[in-house]
Image (cartoon, grey):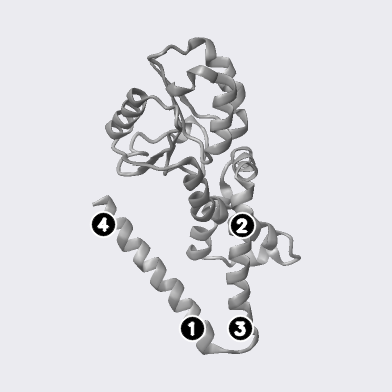
Amino acid sequence: ADLVLLAVPVAATEATFKAIRHLVTPNTLIMDVGSTKREVIDSARRVLRDQVGVFVPAHPITGKELAGVEHADAELYRGRQVILTPIERTLTAQLEKAKQVWTALGCHVRQMSPEAHDAAYAAVSHLPHLIAFALMNSIKGQADGDTYLSLAGPGFRDFTRIAASDPNIWRDILISNREELIAQSRQFQRALHAMETAIAAGNPDALETLIDGASAARSHWRMTAIKSQG
């Protein structure tokens, strides 16, 4: 095989490597699309051993909360980022092929270490999913939860969209990146506690300062994202 793309849950990666190992040649390019990298790379090292250089870990920054071929979208990758996290044994030729493949799909290719990737996406992907799951469970677990949900509007719909994500996939992702995720969760709890403290104290100035900081950070991120895509 010239190109193998692993599109499986993170926990299934090692078994998949074993299933395709006999197909690997020095010219093969293997990539994954997993949301965590260090565990996937560890699996590749164990299974591919001296052939691990043909593996280029990849993470396209796009997706849907809906799974299955019936939800396929030919334009899903166009204009999106893809993060490549080569290791010290990744072959230069395979890395260049990987860049060409994703560029041909319309992606903006970025490169970073597996460690930096997992730290970043714990903050901007895995923690938001964790919060969305927890929020839905929190409301669902209340006696009047169904009534509350019947009154929800577009803001709630947008905020909780990712709570509809595939449970098997996200179970694996959250556990795979648990150290980074727990650190981010605790950081979030500190930020939440600061806002709770201002509310409990009836301190409008402190609360407004925190909200204003969040609003400014979000606006700056949005403008930066628009410029990078343009």
Q: Indicate which disc, 4 or 1, sits on the residue closer to the N terminus.
A: 1
Find disc 1 in the rendering and name its residue: 208
Mark 4 belongs to which amino acid?
Answer: Lys
Q: Please, what is the three-letter code of the amino acid marked with disc 1?
A: Glu
Q: Where is residue 14 in the image (x, y as percent from the top left)?
A: 60, 25
- Distance between the alpha carbons at the discs numbered 3 and 2: 25 Å
Mark 2 or mark 4, earlier in chain: 2
Q: In this orientation, which residue lies closer to the viewer: 130 or 14? A: 14
Question: Pointer 3: what residue?
Answer: 199
Tell which of 34 and 86 is nearer to you. Answer: 86
Residues at badges 3 and 1 in contact (C-beta under 8 Å)? no
SS label for mark 2: helix
Query: Mark 1 or mark 3, which is nearer the start of the sequence?
Result: 3
Say how many tags the image has: 4
View extreme (right): residue = 143
CA–CA distance in space, label 1 to label 2: 26 Å
| Residue name at image x 33 percent, y 23 percent | 93
- Which residue was labeled with disc 2? 183
Calculate the distance from the C-alpha at mark 4 to the C-alpha at mark 1.
28 Å
Q: Earlier in the sequence, mark 3 or mark 2?
A: 2
